[in-house]
Each structure stands twice: as structure tokens, then as C-alpha cells.
Image (cartoon, coloured by chain):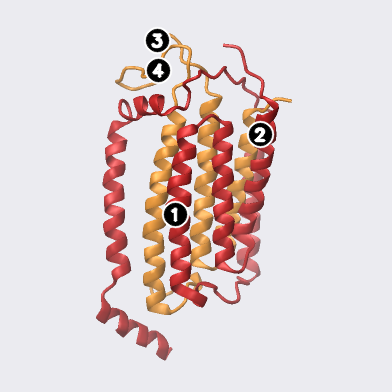
Amino acid sequence: MTLQLGHYLALSMVLFTIGSVGFLVRRNALISLMSIELMLNAVNLTLVAANRWQPAMTEGGSGLVGGTPAVAVGSIAPHGQVFAFFVIAVAAAEAAVGLAIVLSFYRLRKTVRTDAADMLRG
Amino acid sequence: MTPTPSSPAEIVAFFFFGLLAAVSAFGVVAQRNPIRNAVALFVHVLSLAGLYATLSAHFLVAVQLIVYVGAVVVLFVFVIMLLGPASQSSGDGAGRFPRLLGGGAAALVGGLLALQVRGLAPERVARAESFGTLRELGAVLFDSAVLPFEIASLLLTAAVVGAFAVARGHHNKVRLTASEGEQE
């Protein structure tokens, strides 16, 4: 057998679904943040896999807007990997801010249950 | 370009790391004790690094290990340690409605995605030796993606400042509101 793009997409579909179920079902703010990380990782896997199966660069079609193609004709530009790199950067920022919010919320309510976050309810 | 067949090592690595990733993702969601969730997240991140290796994304393997294992998981463990027993929220039984909603939504998303994935079989082009190396990634990163790169640095600075501002808190106000919370 040979690995196809569909294998990776199916795997990342499973991972994303597990992450979204966790986000919707669990009531612990920490677990919710971890579920978001799961979903971001699944998307990253999709991006990197799609990059690996991307058609090779052809003559004239650079795929870039207003820039010179950085890779030679006949090879694949690692745009998907660059995108995943940015997603990792955003995920790190999200984790830092999210955990700071969890800490701040714990100081207010002495719990990390998301049910307890009802201060804005009338 | 002719499609390249996968080597046996690649296939074994894909199924090993893929299974590990799925099992540990389930562990992240299902475990009760938060520190076990964090350990499951650790295993999940490691197995994703392995999957990136099968996709010849060498730079991303390193970034995944440094950023996720070195920073994000450690941050999670740190917060769990800081909160102590309070990080384990008792009675996570959310009631039937949210669970049904969550399960239904996930099944819907999964089904729709499966419809998309089925029958998708593009050919994998031959990999150049330099694909996924730091050199090629840097060429793209500092050529066409240089503006997003700079914006990412702004974003990270804002995140650091914001995390400080949120986590430090305003002490007087916090005491006031916390005592209100106890009276309830």
C-alpha cells in the first residue's frame, strides 16, 4: 500500500472531532483550552499533509502574489508548513492568554468550572 | 514528476504515531485528573511531531517539540500545579443536553468531513531533497511571508503583555469580588 493524502485527512478529522467534542462536553476551563490545542494541532496536520501532496511548481505559475517564487520549478514550495508555523505561534499566544484568564477567573470564583462564569448573566 | 510510493518505515510510522495521537487525544478529553490530561497532551504533541517527520517537515518537528512540549504543555502543568486540587472540577457531568448537543454536532462535522475525504486520491509528487529544510522554509518565510512574520512578533508581544495584565489582577477589586462570591 502507499500512503495517500486521504489517510492524513481522515486522521486529522478524527483528532479534530475528538477536540471539538471535548470542548463542547467538558466543563473544566483547563480541559477546554487543551481541546482547543487538539483542534489547532489537527488543522496543522491537515496543512502540512496538503503541502506534501501539493502539485509541483510549474513554469510561470509562482503561486505568490507580487513576489518572486522562492523555490525552483519542479519542486514544492513549503507554504503549508509556513502556515502551520504561524498557527503554532498563534496557539502559543492563545495558551498564554487563556491560562492567564483561567488564573484570573480562579481568583474571582475559586473554581475553574466554566458553569461558574455567569457574572454577566442578568 | 512521478508519484513516489511510501516506504514501509513511513507506513509503519504513520500508523504508529496516528494511533498514538488518536488514543492520547481521547485521553486529553476523557481523563478526570487534569495532570493526566496534561500528560496525554504531551504524548499527543510528541506523536504529532512524529507525523510531521513522515511528511518531511523537519523544521516543524523541531518547532513542535520546542514550542508545544517546551512551552505550552509546561505552562499547562504549571497552572495545574498552581491551582492544586481546584484544577479538578468536581461533577463534570454537564447534564444530558450539552452532551447530546456536543455528540450530535461532532457526529455531523465528522460525517460531513468524511464525505469530503472519501474518494480523494491525488498523486504525491516526488520529494526534492531540500523539501522541508530550514533553508527552503526560511526562503519563503523571509520573502513572501515576511509581513505575517513581523505581525506574529507583534501578536506575541501583545500576548505577553496581555497575559501579564490579566494574570496580575487588581488586588483590591479581586478581594472585594471574591468576598462577594463567598457570600452567595
What is the chain letter for disc 2?
Answer: A
Residue with the mark numbered 3: A60
Are labels 4 and 2 assigned to the same chain? yes
Q: Is residue A43 left or right of residue A106?
A: right
Closer to the camera: disc 4 or disc 2? Answer: 4
Give the image location of residue A52, x and y in percent. 54, 26
* Colour of chain B in the rendered structure image: red
Spatial separation of the CA atoms under disc 4 and disc 2: 27 Å
Residue B95 lies in what quarter of the image? bottom right
Circle 1: residue type: Val
- Contact (Cβ within 8 Å) of mark 1 with mark 3: no
Q: Which mark is residue A71?
A: 4
Q: Which chain is orange?
A: A
Q: Residue B175's x, y, as percent?
A: 31, 83
Q: Is residue B51 visible?
A: yes
Towards the viewer: B35 or B90: B35
Amino acid type at mark 3: Gly
Mark-to-mark CA distance, 3 and 4: 12 Å
User: Can you see residue A122?
Assistant: no
- In the rendered image, residue B139, in percent from the top left (x then y), is placed at 35, 24
Badge 1 is on which residue?
Answer: B72
Task: Name the secondary structure under disc 1.
Answer: helix
Q: Residues within 10 Å of mark 2 (few under 14, many from 20)?
A: some
